[in-house]
Image: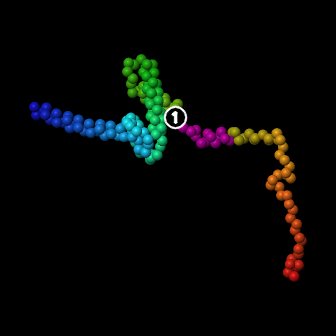
């Protein structure tokens, strides 16, 4: 009896800790996004994304950002799991293994998220392109008006009297 009462006490203590954690999680999930007009309950994933954005220092964002990120994450995970399922079927396994998922992730990273090419490659390509001089442009279309009709052409003359320095002193 002493053992069973200790077990009951231990299980009730862990239940109270678990229920407190669940209540905090549910309260966070139920909280509307700060500074936004979304009213009502937020999915746990939305709260997680909001917390990640806050940890990254992003304070202001449109409510649609969380929806777009949730959609992207859902699509990304779905694609990975579909690929992992294909690998499982190809291996003729009855259950999906972690190796199937790892291979699907590696494949997704290798072909979906490409980084920029190295700057040396870009510089060498630019040299190749710039070796060929540009063609001279022949005058095509209507020729420009002569300079006497341009608005920037001076339409006056200055008359300068030739006065010597000797005359100025007198």
Can residue 106 be seen by looking at this rendering?
no
Q: Nearer the viewer, residue 17 or 150?
A: 150
- Residue 55 picture location, percent across and down: 41, 45
Residue linked to disc 1: 113
Q: Does the magenta run of residues contain 124?
A: yes
Instruction: Give yes or no for residue 42 being in the magenta stretch.
Output: no
Return the residue nearer the eye: 142 or 109.
Answer: 142
| Quarter occupied by the C terminus | bottom right
The structure residue drawn at horizontal position 62% and vertical position 40%, both measured from the top left corner, is: 122
Dominant SS of magenta comes to helix
Q: Which residue is painted at 25% across and 38% down in the image? A: 17
Magenta region, residue range: 114-127
Q: Is residue 160 above or below residue 120?
A: below
- Secondary structure at badge 1 equals loop
Q: How is the image coloured?
A: rainbow
Q: Quadrant of the N terminus?
A: top left
Residue furthest toward the left?
1
Q: Is residue 77 above or below residue 144?
A: above
- Locate residue 149 relative to residue 25 in the image: left or right: right
Extreme residue in the top direction? 92
Q: Quadrant of residue 13?
A: top left
């Amino acid at each position: 009896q002493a053992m069973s009462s200790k077990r009951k006490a231990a299980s009730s203590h862990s239940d109270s800790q678990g229920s407190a954690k669940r209540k905090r999680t549910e309260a966070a999930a139920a909280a509307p996004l700060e500074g936004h007009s979304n009213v009502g309950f937020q999915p746990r994933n939305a709260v997680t994304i909001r917390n990640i954005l806050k940890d990254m220092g992003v304070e202001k964002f449109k409510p649609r950002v969380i929806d777009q990120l949730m959609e992207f994450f859902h699509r990304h995970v779905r694609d990975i799991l579909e690929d992992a399922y294909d690998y499982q079927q190809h291996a003729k396994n009855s259950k999906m293994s972690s190796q199937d998922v790892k291979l699907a992730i590696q494949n997704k990273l290798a072909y979906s998220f490409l980084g920029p090419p190295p700057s040396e490659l870009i510089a060498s390509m630019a040299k190749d392109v710039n070796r060929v001089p540009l063609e001279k442009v022949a005058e095509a279309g209507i020729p420009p008006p002569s300079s006497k009709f341009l608005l920037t052409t001076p339409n006056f003359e200055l008359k300068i009297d030739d006065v010597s320095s000797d005359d100025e002193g007198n």
